[in-house]
Amino acid sequence: MNTTPQPDPKDRPARLTVGVVGAGRVGPALAASLQLAGHRPVAVSGVSEASRRRAAALLPDVPLVPPAEVLGRSELVLLTVPDDALPGLVTGLAETGAVRPGQLLVHTSGRYGAKVLEPALRAGALPLALHPAMTFTGTPVDVQRLAGCSFGVTAPEELRLAAEALVIEMGGEPEWIAEDKRPLYHAALALGANHLVTLVAQSMELLRTAGVDAPDRMLGPLLGAALDNALRSGDAALTGPVARGDAGTVAAHIGELREHAPQAVAGYLAMARATADRALAHGLLKPELAEDLLGVLANGTEGDAR
């Protein structure tokens, strides 16, 4: 349930024509969500065949046009391109005169705040950074997942209410992020979500190697409980051989990984050291057991060097 206080009607943006520059997984979903709130998608740009398919699935009958034409047709423009492409895109659009005064220009990069839109601001645009803290599939299910999704919001103070209103209209929860904290905010999300996918994929591969027929079925309840416990209790939810100080078990793990999945050893060691540090600081790992454990992890690192 969305518990964020609803903005006063006078602070809500009027019904707007919406354009999307970059029909990746994010842009069409956000535009479709805005359409449900009463706004009108009118144009989308996309180069790859996959982008065109996503646009057709989520925004049927919305024409595919070049980026400059998207801006020409739209009062609200979603710039949903990769982070590294965003500064050049904004500069190019501003320099070619595509940006119009009073136009709402929204990017969805987690890394950047509103400052990256400075060239467009000089052209009279209204800059907003609205980053959904969600993974996207490029399918209609993404629109449903936006309900209750947190958005990292950064904008000039005078546009804060408008930015938060747009997020609420998409079913999201606005979370204000200071301009200078955007990279740290994005690093935190990447650490939690992107690295989680890597860890789960590695775990499933190892279980298959161990003879488990359905690693996803085995891991689902375990990982669901671990995530729920971590969100509720933080470090107090730590369990397993590292938190217990079972140095012999950890040594056995490292040996098996070296034999069956050497590419996973470095990640195991790094996460085990981080887990040991947190368990020790939280009082879960006894200092007298930590010495042997850290010794095993150090020997494991030396093994990597060999």
Image (spheres, helix red, strand yellow):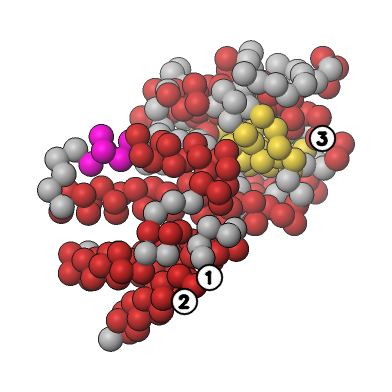
| Residue 291 image label | 2
Q: Nearer the viewer, residue 206 or 162?
A: 206
Q: Residue at x 49, y 72 (%)?
A: 288
Question: Residue 283, can we see it?
Answer: yes
Q: Residue at x 46, y 27 (%)?
A: 142
Q: Main secondary structure of the magenta part?
A: helix
Question: Residue 21, can we see it?
Answer: no
Amino acid type, mark 3: Leu
| Residue 159 image label | 3
Cβ–Cβ under 8 Å for marks 2 and 1: yes
* Mark in the foreground, 3 or 1: 1
Which secondary structure, mark 1? helix
Q: Nearer the viewer, residue 286 or 101?
A: 286
Percent position (x, y) of residue 169?
A: 66, 21
Alpha carbon distance from label 2 to label 1: 7 Å
Percent position (x, y) of residue 183?
A: 64, 56
Q: Residue at x 55, y 40 (%)?
A: 231
Alpha carbon distance from label 2 to label 3: 54 Å
Left or right: 287 in relation to 262: right
Percent position (x, y) of residue 85?
A: 54, 54
Which secondary structure, mark 2? helix
Q: Nearer the viewer, residue 103 or 164?
A: 164
Q: Residue at x 73, y 45 (%)?
A: 177
Amino acid type, mark 2: Glu
- When the figure is inspected, residue 286 is found, relative to residue 27, above or below; the finding is below
Amino acid type, mark 1: Pro
Looking at marks 3 and 1 on the same chain, the residue that comes earlier in the sequence is marked by 3
Q: Which residues are magenta?
A: 215-220
| Residue 217 image label | none
Q: Which residue is mark 1?
A: 287
